[in-house]
Image (cartoon, rainbow, N blue to C red):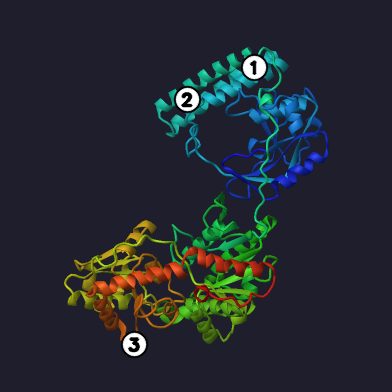
Amino acid sequence: AFIDDDAVPHPQWLTALARAYADPRTGGAGGFTIDHTGVRWQVCKTVCDRFGNAHHVSRFFDTGPLNRPGSPVYPSLLGTNSSFRRSALLEIGGFDHAFAYLLDETEVCLRLVDAGHRIVYVPEALVFHQFAPSHIRNPGRVPRTLYPSARSKAYFIERHGHAALPAEAGPALARYEREIREANAYLEGEGRITPAHRASLDADLGWGIEEGRALARRCDGRRGGSLGPHMAAPAFLKVEPPADRLRLAFVSRGLPPEVDAGIARWTLTMAEGLARRGHEIHLLSEGAERQTSYAAGIWRHVFPAAGGAPEALAERWGLPPGPAAWAAAVAAEVDRLASFGLDAVSFPIWDLEGIGCLGGPVPAVMSLHTTYALSEPFREDWASRPVFARQHVRPMIAAETRALAEAPAILANSRAILRDISARYGIDAHERAHVVAHGTAAIAPGDAEHRAPRVLFLGRFEARKGFDLAAKAVSRLLARLPSAEAVFAGDCLDGPGRAMLEAAGLGALADHPRVSWRGVLPRPDLDQSLRDAAVVLFPSRYESFGLVAIEAFAAGTPVVAFEGSGPVEVIRNGEDGLLVPVEAGGDGLADALERLLTDPRRRAAMGRAARAAYEARYTVDAMCAAAEQVYRQAAAGGRVATLPSAETAA
């Protein structure tokens, strides 16, 4: 069986192909190939003529009658989705070593048919074909050289076309050369290649044709392939996936690097970690155009928020149009992936992206993060838009309430969010929930004791994240410590951010010489900022967990945060950070920052404790090991058992 290096098979590919060989007449079998969209056919059935020209036919076309020796046209398999009976391949001498690129599998199919074997199509044997640039074509699919393909084409026509239709072989080769030269001229005219590139391609074409014809003449009429002697019985390596491997789908409308918010980052981190543990992962996210790709155990399915049945979801759950459209698209995609044998689908409570999967054939796990209801008290923009609040926020909170009541399995990132949800929604989800602390990738820590006295605020510039309180604390700190400096990252200081500063009487901070506004940073720059900071300021008014805190811990950086909600489960006051009473506000934060910045030894000890806490409780592998058990039990259809959280287990 053969596949390209930029393609990946459906899990049932080999099983489907093998069934074709129950018929002893079958010499080769291939399936249908799907392109990079994941839903559109690239090639279904193809027949070729004696000059190697491909003719795509309907997938309903019966190629059976073409399986006869000497047929002018015959079924031809795509190289990236083909298989051959070994004994038949040996009989015809195997592949012809003269072919480097183009027509090698076509020529094998021709010789198999001429030898009395059948080439058949197996529609359910699916291969997903991506596109990888190489030394013969660039990322825009423009050839870098035409020599290998021209050599193969000329060789094919001289060996097979000339033998069957000698009078037509010359014109066929001339027609091929003319069409390729015209294509090169078109590429130059469109500005896709330079005149020098065109000249090089034209020269390659002529050289390849000349070499291919000469090679065919040296064959002296030999009809078989040249690889037969090399086809000794192989020592097959039997590779079986782990018996307990899971096939899981994770949903996040956005994913890094385009979207680096907490839920998006958690989703990608969880997916990559579980893939490293041997599980097959499907990532579902939004994009303007469909695309399916595969790498390192992860299938990525990108698709627009269209399709499915949004009206039905809106009616059943009371969802607003936007969330209903995306949730319907997600549900349709999960249904489309059913043939992969999905064991469970995981989606976040925020925006209820996978709510259409609740009650469906694939077990669903809803992960708890900050919700609409828990965010509402801190969203002044919602309160100032009564129509939006009535038509979007209130329906989303009502749908969240129903989802919390009906979700069969819940993955919580902290005990705090379970308490807060019980209080806010009046739903006790403890029996269906399991607490798994977030994990994050390691960051090589720097020298904690000798770092510059720099404070890092990382987050969106909004009230829930405590941006106004961070600004107040930094303003107080800079006035007290002439050596102190501050970095704000994670958002852009645009209109709303500046308005918050002005409203707090801190407009001058925007241009302060010891304050840097870094905007949204790429991940490497963000990691470096965490490494360089002496203290991370984390003044959120509400957090379900506190991802920023464990990212700081990974870099060996202590944290100053408010008491309450999720961070209190992460930060051990006085050991790896300082917790400030909420009522102390910005002044309390400034005091805590000053204590750490003026005591390098204490700060360094806290940094070491922070790193130790990360290594013990907040690594990606620790998170995935705990979450794996939740997904496994959800897939089995049973209630999630009360398991120890990652922190308790540590």
- Three-letter residue code for mark 2: Leu
Q: Position of residue 20 (x, y in %)?
A: 78, 41
73 above or below 3?
above
Rate crowding at label 1 as few (under 14), some (14 to 19) or many (20 or more) other CA atoms within 10 Å: many
- Three-letter residue code for mark 1: Glu
**Residue bearing mark 3:** 583
SS of the residue under disc 1: helix
133 above or below 578?
above
**Residue bearing mark 2:** 201
> Residue shown at 60%/39% (left/top)?
4
Q: Position of residue 558 (x, y in %)?
A: 33, 72
Marks 3 and 2, the one that precedes in the sequence:
2
- Three-letter residue code for mark 3: Glu
Marks 1 and 2, the one that precedes in the sequence:
1
Quadrant that contains the N terminus: top right
- The answer to whether residue 278 of the structure is visible from this angle is yes
Residue 245: image quadrant is bottom right
359 above or below 386?
above
Drawn side of residue 177 relative to residue 581, left or right: right
> Residue shown at 34%/87% (left/top)?
583
Q: Position of residue 271 (x, y in %)?
A: 54, 60
**Outermost left residue:** 482
